[in-house]
Image (tube, helix red, strand yellow):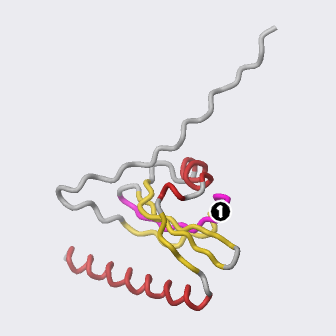
Amino acid sequence: MKKVSLIIVLFLFAVFTNGQNQTAAKTGSNRVKIKINELPREITTVSMGTDHLGYAIKEAYRITQGKVRNYEILITNGTINKSLLYDSKGNILKLLETKPAIPPKKGEPPMKQFKPAAPPPAIEPPKN
């Protein structure tokens, strides 16, 4: 039963991905896989640190359409995978997809969790 479920999920993913590629070709957008450290700081520290605390970034894509640059990121918290579309300022434009995560295979290390940057130290008022 698990194999059948996995095959169905993979088939649906293939259909969804194919539809995205056809849409990108029609609109003239360019979707390129990038390294996670190439994401804008606003996405990795501000948004991921507050809105999706405990999630790890699996993959990142830069989507360019004319002069507009957006970012699609795939994140997981171990049980749920999400695909989010961000603008370059770190604002979430759209939740593209949410689905259960597939656990790592035996012998594979678990994914590292995203650790947000430490908050700045508190500033105390001067004492008179």
* Coordinates of residue 116 in the picture (x, y in percent): 51, 44
76 left or right of 6 in image: right
* Coordinates of residue 10 in the picture (x, y in percent): 32, 79
In this rendering, the answer to whether 37 lies above or below 31 is: above
User: Which residue does the image show at 64% across and 70% down from the upper left?
Assistant: 69
In front of the other: 110 or 51: 110
User: Which residue does the image show at 47% across and 44% down from the upper left?
Assistant: 115
Type of amino acid at the residue the image marks with label 1: Ser
Q: For residue 106, what is the image quadrant?
A: bottom left
For the N terminus, the quadrant is bottom left
* Coordinates of residue 60 in the picture (x, y in percent): 48, 65
Q: Which residue is mark 1?
A: 88
The magenta region covers 79-90
For the C terminus, the quadrant is top right
Q: For residue 117, what is the image quadrant?
A: top right
Residue 83: say if magenta.
yes
User: Which residue does the image show at 26% across and 76% down from the upper left?
Assistant: 6
Residue 21: say if magenta.
no
Q: Residues within 10 Å of mark 1 (few under 14, many from 20)?
A: some
User: Which residue does the image show at 51% across and 73% down from the upper left?
Assistant: 32
**Which residue is the extreme one toward the right?**
128
In front of the other: 31 or 12: 31
Counting the numbered discs, the total is: 1
Label 1 residue SS: loop
In this rendering, the answer to whether 3 lies above or below 91 is: below
In this rendering, the answer to whether 49 lies above or below 106 is: above
